[in-house]
Image (spheres, grey):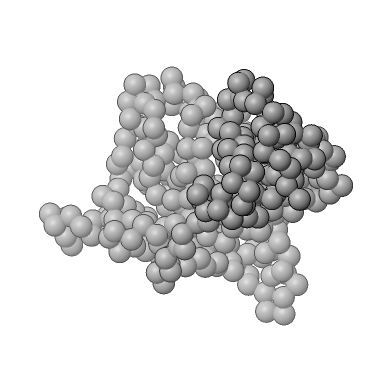
Amino acid sequence: MLASYQKVFKEVKPQLKSLRDRDVRIKVSLILLALKLGCVTEACQRRGFSRKFFYKWYGRLRRGKWNLLALREESRRPRKKHPLKICQAYEDRIHYQARLGFGSPSIQAILARQGIKISRSTINHVLRKRRRRVERTRREKLKSHRRRYELPIPGMRVQMDVKYVPEPVEGFRAYNYVAIDECTRMRFAYAYLDLTAANTLDFLSRMKAFFPFDIAVIQTDNGFEFTNRLIPSHAGHEHPMDEWCRLNGIRHRCIPPGEKELNGKIERSHRIDEQFFYWKAPTDNLERFNAALASWLIIYNHDRLHGGLGFITPVEKLWQTYEANRKSAVPDLNILKDLPKRFAAYKKAARLFAKTG
């Protein structure tokens, strides 16, 4: 049973003078029109609303004793904390790791090592401040050579590349030579002020002494510092790197031009350097830059969790592979060859270089 138009109008008229909420004014006008016409259907047709909409807000207004505040939209969010909501301390840890540049998979792995088990969806809710998820467009299918793959033996193939340092070092452009093992993701890097074949040979010698395992294949792009393949004037001349690989029993493999995806692991590591190292590295002196780079490599190889390895460190991956090979019925002698002794020497040399540069 609807109330009379005169009664409702008498109650709401004084409130309309100070009312500025447009949504409330629309609802009031609909209710007053329906009462004046004496027909809810006709009033809803004139205003473009459903009968259900009318009776919903008319009931609220009547239960609110004709106070127009009853027509305002109220949040349905519960006033009490949800029993499954994580505590504020855990949320602070999630935000702290996010400020360091880690995504939800890495944050989940880091917290798990601290004895805190939180689902990835909960971490995403915290990082998005519990906003409604936006639907993303479907990704195109990856090409065959862009699919991820893993090699079972350390040293089976090492990707090598050169990255321009974003900031000048000693006022000059610096070139950061980087090598990464495809199995363990262990990395070695060293910076130079010139991009020459001589520096390439120096880096190769340092890299071979750095890794605690033998190297079978080195994979590079077709830069002039690595090969003469794309230099017509040097056709038929052996590049110094090819000669070094031949003398050391290592195969040098060049990827096809324009397909950097084949060196995807080292390209991904360049982005990690830009995110966590280059912006804070000292650039006034090349020796100090290389010392900081060596310290960063210790963090990268020993402490940083890698999603491509199942959120373990490269050193943990090396020892996992070593133990699996040692217990295998047909062990691979390449990885078993003096690995504990060579790893101890590597660790001592790496930390010494990080201190002295």
Residue at the spot x=55%, y=66% of the render?
A: 150
The percent coordinates of residue 279 (x first, y second) are 48, 29
Nearest the eye: 252 or 9: 9
Quarter-wise, where is residue 252 in the image? Answer: bottom left
Q: Is residue 313 above or below residue 89?
A: below
Left or right of 145 on screen, residue 39: right
Nearest the eye: 259 or 55: 55
User: Can residue 98 be seen in this snapshot?
Assistant: no
Q: Is residue 68 above or below residue 2?
A: above
The percent coordinates of residue 58 (x first, y second) are 70, 44
| Residue at far bottom of view | 329
Left or right of 357 on screen, residue 250: left
Left or right of 117 on screen, residue 280: left
The percent coordinates of residue 15 (x first, y second) are 66, 24
Q: Is residue 121 above or below residue 143?
A: above
The percent coordinates of residue 309 (x first, y second) are 63, 58
Quarter-wise, where is residue 146 in the image? Answer: bottom left
User: Can residue 139 be seen in this snapshot?
Assistant: yes
Residue at the spot x=34%, y=21% of the render?
A: 171
Quarter-wise, where is residue 253 in the image? Answer: bottom left
How many numbered dots are placed on residues in this image? Answer: 0
Residue at the spot x=74%, y=31% of the render?
A: 67
